[in-house]
Each structure stands twice: as C-alpha cells, then as structure tokens.
Image: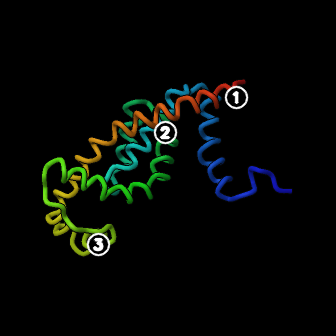
Amino acid sequence: MTTPETSSPAKSFWRRRVLDVILAQLKQGITPQKISLTLALGMALGIFPILGATTLLCFLFGLWLKLNQPIIQVVNYLIYPLQLVLILVFVRIGEFMVRATPVSFSIPELFRKFHESPREFFRQFGMTGVHGIIGWLLVAPFVAAGLYFLFLPLMKKLARGHQP
C-alpha cells in the first residue's frame, strides 16, 4: 500500500533529509529561532559566488553561532543549483557597484579555463570573483533576514505541533 510519505521519491527524500532532521532538533529542544537562523544562513551562505567556498563558510558560521552543522550543510548542498544561477547576477551587481567593464563569461567556460590552467584562470578572472563577492555582500544580508522571518513562523508552528 502506498502512503503519502512514500508516494514519491522526491517527497520521501525531503521528508528524510530535511523535515525529519528539523523535527528531531525541535524535539531535542533546539529553538525555532535557532533552526530558522540555521536555514536562513545555510541558504544565504550557500549562494556565495565562489564555488567550493560555501562548505567552509557554513562550517565557520555554524561554529561561531553554534548552529546545527548537519542542517546548515544539507541546506548548503541543496541550494547549490541556485548558487550556479546567481554567480553571474552577483558578478554583474559587483561590476555595476565599482563601475567595472562587464566581463563576458559562462560557467562552463570558467570550469574549462580553471582546469586548463588555474594560474591563468585567477589572473584572468580574479577581479570577476571580487565583483561577485561585492554583489553577494550587498544582497546576502537581505536574503538571510528575509528567509529568517519567513522560516520563523513555520518553525514555531512545527514546534507547537510536535511538542512532547
């Protein structure tokens, strides 16, 4: 017999990997505020425009703010496709802010050039990375705050519904 939880692999994945982990933390006494902050920062840090840096950023912020490491890392990894989409957006915002000439590139081209010669890649695209970071620094605080206040009532509702 098929139950709603097992009716689709995607639903089952989200239930096991995200919702069940959050519910377990709520049952152990982690506050809805802390879980909301963990989710919000996992997403805001997960869209940082430098590939490979988000795991370390999430780890460091998680340690500093005493956030749940498994949750922040799962959110970070789940947000990865959005990170790829937003790299160009952040670069363009940063270029606009510092009045730099827009650089033409694509994500596949960046991967190819990096694998050909990391030194040449950093010489050619180093400032592009800086522009992306500038764009992200302007946007990320608003993203984190907005997501926190979006998640907080949801986490409070989950906590009320699953109190012992």
Estimate the spatial distance between the alpha carbons at disc 2 and disc 3, rounded to whole Å.
31 Å
**Which residue does the numbered mark 1 point to in the structure image?**
161
Front in this rendered view, residue 148 or 35: 148
Residue 23: x %, y % from top left: 64, 35
Q: Residues within 10 Å of mark 2 (few under 14, many from 20)?
A: many
Estimate the spatial distance between the alpha carbons at disc 1 and disc 3, rounded to whole Å.
48 Å
- Does residue 14 lie above or below 106 as drawn? above
**Which residue does the numbered mark 3 point to in the structure image?**
109
Which quarter of the rendered picture does the C terminus lie within? top right
| Kind of residue at disc 3 | Glu
Taking the spot 20% from the left edge, 58% from the top edge, the residue there is 128
Residue 26: x %, y % from top left: 61, 30
**Which residue does the numbered mark 2 point to in the structure image?**
39
Estimate the spatial distance between the alpha carbons at disc 1 and disc 2, rounded to whole Å.
19 Å
Q: Residues within 10 Å of mark 1 (few under 14, many from 20)?
A: few
- In the rendered structure, the answer to whether residue 87 lies left or right of residue 21 reads left
Front in this rendered view, residue 153 or 26: 153
- In the rendered structure, the answer to whether residue 19 lies left or right of residue 62 reads right
- Does residue 35 lie above or below 112 as drawn? above
Q: Secondary structure at mark 2?
A: helix
Taking the spot 39% from the left edge, 43% from the top edge, the residue there is 44
Q: Secondary structure at mark 1?
A: helix
Q: Residues within 10 Å of mark 3 (few under 14, many from 20)?
A: few
